[in-house]
């Protein structure tokens, strides 16, 4: 899939944030109907995150990913099956485990390379910005859920980026 540029991501996020309750419900319905496995995957993760999920923009970011990648593709994205999500999550988890085995310097270099070499780097970068917006001054104090949320979002992006 073509790389999603930053400007449409920002525009779509602004529109998403401006939705009223009725529009938001309709978007959620379309997302759930079009991507039922992704919807179940997100619900499972919000349960895993627990009470902090109410403070999380995870579902909104997942819908953003779906909307901008659909727009970029110019057609509906194929329905993601649970097995594809499992494979992508496993690959991302293994990658993170391999990164954590290196030194702190190696991890920072790998993190930077991961984002810049990733086909959807603008989209992943934007998700990171939103997830970290309240903790950008002291990222070491960010809630632990943010790492899980990033794993979930990268998994979803990987599945749609076929």
Image: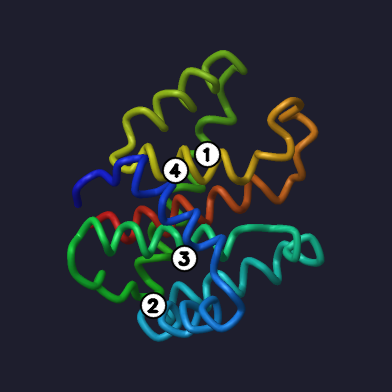
- Labels 2, 3: front one: 3
* Colour setup of the view: rainbow
Task: Say whether disc 4 or disc 3 marks the residue closer to the N-terminus.
Answer: 3
Q: Residue furthest top?
A: 105
Rounded to the nearest angstrom, the CA distance separating label 4 from label 1 is 15 Å
- Image quarter where the C terminus lies is bottom left
Residue named by callout 1:
96
- Labels 4, 1: front one: 4
User: Marks 4 and 1: CB-CB under 8 Å?
Assistant: no
User: Marks 2 and 3: CB-CB under 8 Å?
Assistant: no
- Residue at image position (34%, 49%) is 8
User: Marks 2 and 4: CB-CB under 8 Å?
Assistant: no
- Residue at image position (49%, 27%) is 111
Crowdedness near tag 2: few (<14), some (14–19) or many (≥20) residues, C-alpha within 10 Å: some
Rounded to the nearest angstrom, the CA distance separating label 2 from label 1 is 26 Å
Task: Say whether disc 2 or disc 4 marks the residue closer to the N-terminus.
Answer: 2
Residue named by callout 3:
63
* Element on which disc 2 rests: loop
Task: Say whether disc 3 or disc 1 marks the residue closer to the N-terminus.
Answer: 3
| Above-or-below relation of 126 to 52 | above
- Labels 3, 1: front one: 3
Rounded to the nearest angstrom, the CA distance separating label 3 from label 1 is 24 Å
- The tag on residue 35 is 2
Residue named by callout 4:
124
Q: Nearer the viewer, residue 102 or 6?
A: 6
| Residue 41 on image: x %, y % | 52, 72
Q: Nearer the viewer, residue 107 or 121?
A: 121
């Amino acid at each position: 899939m073509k790389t999603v540029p930053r400007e449409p991501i920002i525009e779509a996020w602004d529109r998403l944030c401006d939705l009223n309750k009725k529009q938001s419900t309709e978007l959620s319905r379309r997302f759930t109907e079009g991507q039922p496995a992704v919807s179940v995957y997100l619900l499972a993760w919000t349960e895993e995150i627990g009470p902090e999920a109410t403070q999380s923009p995870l579902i909104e970011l997942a819908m953003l990913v779906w909307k901008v990648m659909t727009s970029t593709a110019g057609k509906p994205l194929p329905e993601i099956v649970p097995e594809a999500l499992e494979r992508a999550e496993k690959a991302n988890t293994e990658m993170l485990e391999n990164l954590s085995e290196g030194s702190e310097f190696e991890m920072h270099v790998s993190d930077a390379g991961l984002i810049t070499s990733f086909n959807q780097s603008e989209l992943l970068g934007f998700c990171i910005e939103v997830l970290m917006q309240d903790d950008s001054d002291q990222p070491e104090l960010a809630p632990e859920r943010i790492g899980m949320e990033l794993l979930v979002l990268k998994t979803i992006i990987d599945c749609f980026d076929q």
